[in-house]
Image (spheres, coloured by chain):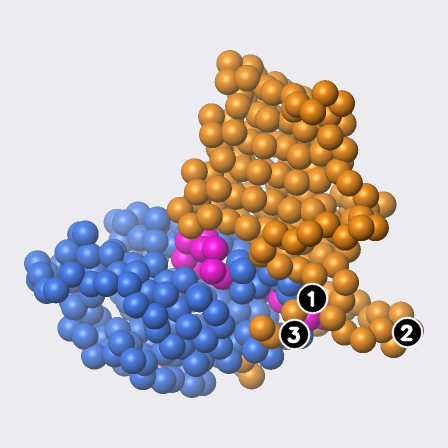
Chain colours: A orange, B blue
Amino acid sequence: MFNKKESSSAVEEPRPVSQPARRESSDGHRAVIGASIHVDGELRGEEDLLIEGKVKGTVELKKNSVTIGSSGEVKADVFAHTIYVDGKMHGNLVASERIVVRKSAEIRGSITSPRVSLEDGARFNGTIDMDPDSEALKKAFSNRQSSQPVRSTPNTGKPEAKDTDKSAQPGA
Amino acid sequence: MTAAASVHEEPAKSYELRVPLFQSIFEPFDPERRYVVLDLGPARSGLIELLVGLRCRLDVIGLPDMLGHLQSLEEPERIRQAIKASLPPPRGEFVNVVLGWNLLNYLDDERIQVLAQALKSRLAPGACLHALIEYSSRHMPAVPGMMTPRDAGNLLVEPDENDGLIDTPRYARARLEAALPGMRAEQTMLLGNGMQEYLFRFSTS
């Protein structure tokens, strides 16, 4: 449909061979912030995380997945490889690979990822940016390689022109 | 808001609706170009799937959840503030496409005008507004039903008649243009379900 970039799709795709695998936690499990836990500050790490409690501040797990569970309440900026949202989220979600919003989710803020899926019934108010060249994505994952989609346009060998300020007139 | 009417007809069923003007918005999208789409309705999977792979930013304001509040406000300035508060930050970008779905049917002339004024400063020159207006039918569900793109040219319409039916405003083209300052109806089309499909174009002049 349209002239879309080939590799961007709402459907789960097999990971290309050259794409580095997301880092799993060493014991195969994910860390959990339980429902009675409140965290206020900055969270960093290199393992998957499930949030069922309340988190305020910043969550940075850029090589791992973050799940905001159904009882989770997050007021934070979240940076991760993949983000799943079942609970309440107020802030900015940035994922280098994919963001999945399930129907129980309530989100106010922004979602930035080249792949976004949202189940009908989810409550969302804000911005969804699926542009793989978006400034927010570049800034958060400046050394990322895995999520750069293959362009459908032929490679002319010339540098690609980037013009984010052009004012398009759809439907003209 | 249109006058309420307790009319009960056959329960409405979901159906697919061909929407050529909706399709005409997205077909010329250039994959190398960035677009900003403003959805006045709730977030819906079908629209996200339609836009995925394009260099798109989608702003969602969920107007249906605000309808009761907007209708309770009398002063235009308070209505404008409520709409503005629901808009995501512009982040230095202007909106190219506004998707109004069937929502204008649920606003009176004054509220449509306030909505248009609230959006005006956010629109790029040449931006378009797509809307589906009740035309043939005298009644419509009291709450707006969901419309989800199946593909670029077809919507799945899911009427919600749990709250009964109300009279349709049956807006005519001239009345809509009067309520949408700076917009002119560029194309209109009568659809299979009796609704009129509109593509308005925003002009700075």
Q: Disc 3 marks which residue? A: A3
When asked about the image quadrant of residue B157, the answer is: bottom left
In the rendered view of the protein, which quadrant contains the N terminus of chain A? Answer: bottom right
Location of residue A121 with respect to B118 vertically, above or below = above
Instruction: Give the residue furthest to the top.
Output: A36
Q: Nearer the viewer, residue B138 or B116?
A: B138
Chain letter of disc 2 in the image: A
Q: Residue A142, how many percent across, how many down?
A: 83, 46
Q: Are marks 1 and 2 in contact (CB under 8 Å)?
A: no
Q: CA distance from mark 1 to mark 2?
A: 20 Å
Q: Mark 1, mark 3: which one is toward the viewer?
A: 1
In the image, residue B46 lies in the stretch drawn in magenta: yes
Q: Disc 1 marks which residue? A: A6
2 and 3 marks on the same chain: yes
Name which of mark 2 and mark 3 comes first in the sequence: 3
Q: CA distance from mark 2 to mark 3?
A: 20 Å
Location of residue A87 with respect to B165 vertically, above or below = above
Residue sitting at x 43%, y 81%:
B20
Q: Which residues are magenta?
A: B31-47
Name which of mark 1 and mark 2 comes first in the sequence: 1
Tell me the amino acid under the disc marked 3.
Asn
Residue sitting at x 36%, y 84%:
B189
Instruction: Give the residue furthest to the right.
Output: A157
Q: Mark 1, mark 2: which one is toward the viewer?
A: 1
Q: Disc 2 marks which residue? A: A158
Q: CA distance from mark 1 to mark 3?
A: 9 Å
Q: Residue B50, how many percent across, how many down?
A: 54, 64
Tell me the amino acid under the disc marked 2.
Lys
Instruction: Report the number of numbered marks.
Output: 3
